[in-house]
Amino acid sequence: MLDWLINLDYTLFTWINGLAGRNMLADSAMKAFCNDHLIPFTLGFLALVMMLKGRDRLDDRRNFAAVVRIFLTIALSMALMQLVITLVHRPRPFVDYPVNLLFYKPVDWSFPSNPATATFSFFFSALLSDRRFGWWFLPPALLMSFARIWCGVHYPGDVLAGILLAFAAACLVHRLDFLSRPFVSIVRNLESRLRSALSLRE
Amino acid sequence: MEVFHEDILETFLFCFLASLGIVQIMAARRGWHGLCVYGRRLNRGVNNALGAALLIFSYAWYFSDPLHRNVRNIEALMSLVCLLLGVAAALLATAAAASLSESLWRLFRPPAGESARTAREEAGKPEELATPNAKLLISPAWEKADRKLVILAETGRGSERLVRRLLPYLPHDMGYASLHPREEGGGGEPEGRERASSLLGALRELEERVGAGLQGADLLGLGWSGNELLRLREHLERTCRPRRFLVVAPVVPDPGHALLGDAFLSNTPWDILCRILAGKPWREGAFRSTLRIWIPFSLACMAAGAVLTSFFDIRWQVFSGLAGGLIVSLWLAYFPAARKGLAGRGKNREERTVPGLFWEHLHPGECPLEVVICGDDAHLLRARAAPQGGVRFHVLAGSLRGKFFLDRRGLQRLLELLAR
């Protein structure tokens, strides 16, 4: 079963990675999406937009709590990922096979995909808090994960594992309220203090 | 391990500039005049252009460097730290710029209607008196004046500045006295009962100083002191018998949602900070109790964090250990604090303040009551049925509480009201 899955994973990888090197425009776009900074920071800025986008203070409170949960989800998914990394040591595709490599050679293990875990943590957590705005996080997360396979640094299975980890972490953070409650309470009290400090000025 | 110091700085700058751009765009979208970095009123076009320019510049600048494209540099954790610090720095920079620019505007720009200044200034400056409860400003013509106005101002220098700007425009035949309560606790807040007795004390001191009662005077409450005036109305009707009560720009809460208002709409961050500090939050029992719970947790967690990160040779050993310990200590200390009712399920200060504020005091009394509402609170007045009879409402459309209260005909309309 495991061999069958690994073969399927490799087959999928060769299909996607095989597309690299055929079209310069597509390669350039995939290199950009694969970048360590472009999409993670863009998702971070989207979280800032989410925090400030409300129509009133009640909206703001919900959004602040959502952003707190996003960062908790990231922290939890990273912790879960480290746990998996200590148990599973899967080399990068370029170590075992000839690939179209469009990226620098990362030195850590391949499974699970670190960027997929992080970007999908943004997506799942945002979606569980805000069913409308949360979808804005999906295209960047998908693009980055797909680009990592295209550029030859991850197998599809790594990405899938990252997505599952992110989903599990988001569900845990949103289901186990006690994880986020202290931080949400602190943020809410701070918001209340700041925004109720009204004074009359010329 | 390699440390990419230059990259860390550039990544932080990138996050800072992009966040600054986003904050500008969102401030324009929300109408937060208090966070306007160039002072006075927000101009949506300017803010959006500024925000977009900052965003485009930050992305173009950062990703134009080949080192930031598909080259191994700073790791994920440091990127996250750069993002969080960049966002925090952008918020602080916006707060500082908004406060500074507004202070400069206040210093160098005369208020609207300056040309209509009356000859009042030649009549002499007000006499200043310090009493245990308040600072008093009394016009030289107080005793001879046919009409008298007693102004109850908010605490703080900003409020005093507002009153001093207002005084020269008052009608010639009007004697005035203005009371500026000492900065202790926040007026209108739970401690408001103490504040109310302090205001009563200040009124008594005024009566003693001027040697006459306040019968027949107009009592004007500004801002939070307007709320106090409403609270004291029945008592003052019995003791002072004023001609009328004028409550200008009181805090109008939204009781349905337990909200007092939104200071970001027009108060600068500096005004907000001053307002909070004037309440001396560190003297609150709840604050001290919370601190007593949190400090042992924070010390233990930070020490454990520093030891762990040093032992396992984690990047930025001591710093990351201390920071991690601090975050964990906040989480841990919350639960014992919540069990003692200090956090979480208990009502916060704002929620405790809202009941009994403003709406409950609007019933008709013996003396006429006129209430002037700022533009930012007008929707609350529309949302609730106004009480019948005895109370007259005026809305200063276009004026906001924390800024340009005297702009856009606000001063003119206030003077017309006072002249009646």
Image: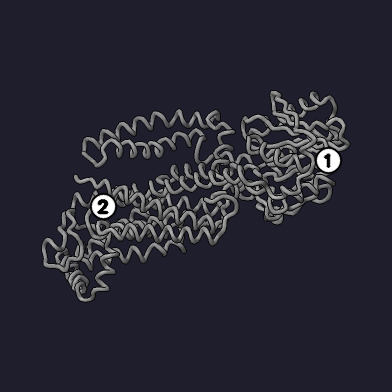
Can residue B188 be seen in the rendering of this structure?
yes
Give the side of residue A91 with respect to residue B332, left or right.
left
Give the x, y percent position of residue A15: 20, 73
Instruction: Answer with the quarter of the image where residue A113 lies.
Output: bottom left
| Disc 1, SS | loop
Residue placed most toward the observer, B31 or A92: B31
Give the x, y percent position of residue B240: 83, 32
Q: Amino acid at mark 1?
A: His
Give the side of residue B271 with respect to residue A158, left or right.
right
Q: Residues within 10 Å of mark 1 (few under 14, many from 20)?
A: some
Q: Which residue is mark 1?
A: B172
Residue shown at 64%/43% (left/top)? Answer: A201
Give the x, y percent position of residue A122: 37, 57
Give the x, y percent position of residue B224: 68, 40
Q: Residues within 10 Å of mark 2 (few under 14, many from 20)?
A: many
Output the chain of dot 1. B
Residue placed most toward the observer, B56 or B187: B56
Q: Is the residue B290 above or below the residue B42 in the image?
A: above
Output the chain of dot 2. A
Mark 1 vs mark 2: give the one in front. 1
Residue shown at 39%/59% (left/top)? Answer: B57
Q: CA distance from mark 1 to mark 2?
A: 76 Å
Instruction: Answer with the quarter of the image where residue A34 lies.
Output: bottom left
Share a chain, discs 1 and 2? no
Give the side of residue A16 with respect to residue B62, left or right.
left
Q: Amino acid at mark 2?
A: Met
Residue shown at 46%/58% (left/top)? Answer: B51
Q: Which residue is mark 2?
A: A81
Give the side of residue B80 with respect to residue B88, left or right.
left
